Amino acid sequence: MKKTLYRLTAAFFAIVVSFAAVLALAGCGSSKTTDSSNSSKTDKKAVEAVAGDYYLDLSELGMKLVIYLRLTENGTFQFSNTTDFEINKSSGVVQKGANDYVMVYESVNGADKSISDGLTSSFFVDDEGRLDFTHCEKIYYGSASATTTSDSSDAKLLAVKIPEGYEQPDTESAFTTGTYTATGADRTYTATFYVDNTYVVTESRTENGEKQYFSETGTYGVNTSQLALTPEGKERISCEVLSDLELQIQVLTGVDTDSRETLTFKKQEVKEVTAKLTGTGTVTRTNESFDVTVLLYSDGSYTSRAGSFTENGVIVPDSKDGTFKIYPDNNETKLRGLNQIATVPAGTLSSESGGLKLEGFRVRNSDNLTRYKCEISEN
């Protein structure tokens, strides 16, 4: 079955054009035009001719998503997720090229852009008055991005003028943040999604009686039934929201491979303690010591108790590198995720006699933000 492949980064959809391709388009002005005044008038009329509000329905390309485009007679454009265009996903100016129209972005997701950023898109007008973006590889839209490629020569990306009486389709998603779990061959997977649009997928298994953990982190975006993950340092992958309790996620089939398999993850309603580690810490440049207890939970979170002080957050273990990282909850808002605090330096992870050992776990033992290294292990 021919199907367009979409890959998304964040909570909203975006399609983007190759800068080099657009430069070629922008450089294709007519060599026969010598009167710049007449040329300017012609370009202005061409821009006025396409002014209006349009919708781009992507459902035929494999994604239940509609985005909206407004072109003005003054030569500006705006993308939005609503027909009233109150939300500015991206905007800029549109110009008439030799054959196509070229869109130059001046704002994307609230951030100012300039032509030097190379953010441009292009389209041409077909015989039915539709804007054809089919040969435009990408369009910038909001905070996330999706690249579209098609195996079908019939697939088209068209912007159609919004007719009178048009009703905006429902694009709500059943997706909810939280922890989902799945079981593979002799291993388990935990996928946790946070409100700051970050996620962690951790594979857990036992080898030769020792616990092994392999984690992948990144950002995610959701639109209706589409879930797009962007692993750190890797390309986006397409996943699916089956319901408010189930997701289909592509996970790595091994530690040293980029191949993936799709598993069904189910929502975990109650977290459980998976490990209890204890040890001691010492205040820097003193002989003062304090007891440390760290509880690890099935949703990938932790609670550390150092002296009388308690802190919560996310722990990301990786047996391949023999390291772990912690991401404490935001100290002021208490929000949880990988973007809530500057990363605390990584520590060393190992497994001894079937139990975990964490060296360099940095804890706070008071409201003071100072952290102290400690060594903790399972009893």
Image (cartoon, helix red, strand yellow):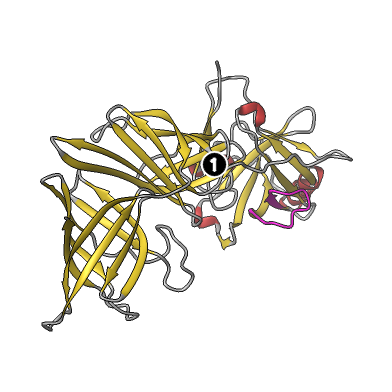
Count residues near mark 1 (Cα–Cα under 10 Å), then give few for <14, some for 14-19, many for 20+.
many
Residue displayed at 57% across by 43% down: 175
Name the image quarter holding the N terminus: top right
Q: Is residue 167 visible?
A: yes
Find out whether residue 85 is within the magenta segment: yes
Image quarter for residue 306? bottom left
- Percent coordinates x, y for residue 116 in the rendering: 50, 57
Does residue 347 appear left or right of residue 97 in this picture? left
- Percent coordinates x, y for residue 93 in the rendering: 67, 54
Q: Residue furthest top?
A: 1
Q: Residue furthest bottom?
A: 286
- Percent coordinates x, y for residue 27 in the rendering: 57, 43
Which is more toward the observer, 209 or 214?
209
- Percent coordinates x, y for residue 7 in the rendering: 50, 37
Residue displayed at 73% across by 49% down: 82
Residue displayed at 49% across by 40% down: 228
> Please, what secondary structure does the residue beneath circle 1 have?
loop
Instruction: Name the residue carrying label 1.
Output: 17
Does residue 223 appear left or right of residue 311 in this picture? right
Magenta part mainly helix, strand or loop?
A: loop
Name the image quarter holding the C terminus: bottom left
Does residue 66 appear left or right of residue 184 in this picture? right
Q: Which residues are magenta?
A: 77-89
**114 up-or-down from 122: above or below:** below
Find out whether residue 273 is within the magenta segment: no
Q: Amino acid at mark 1?
A: Val
Q: Is residue 31 visible?
A: no
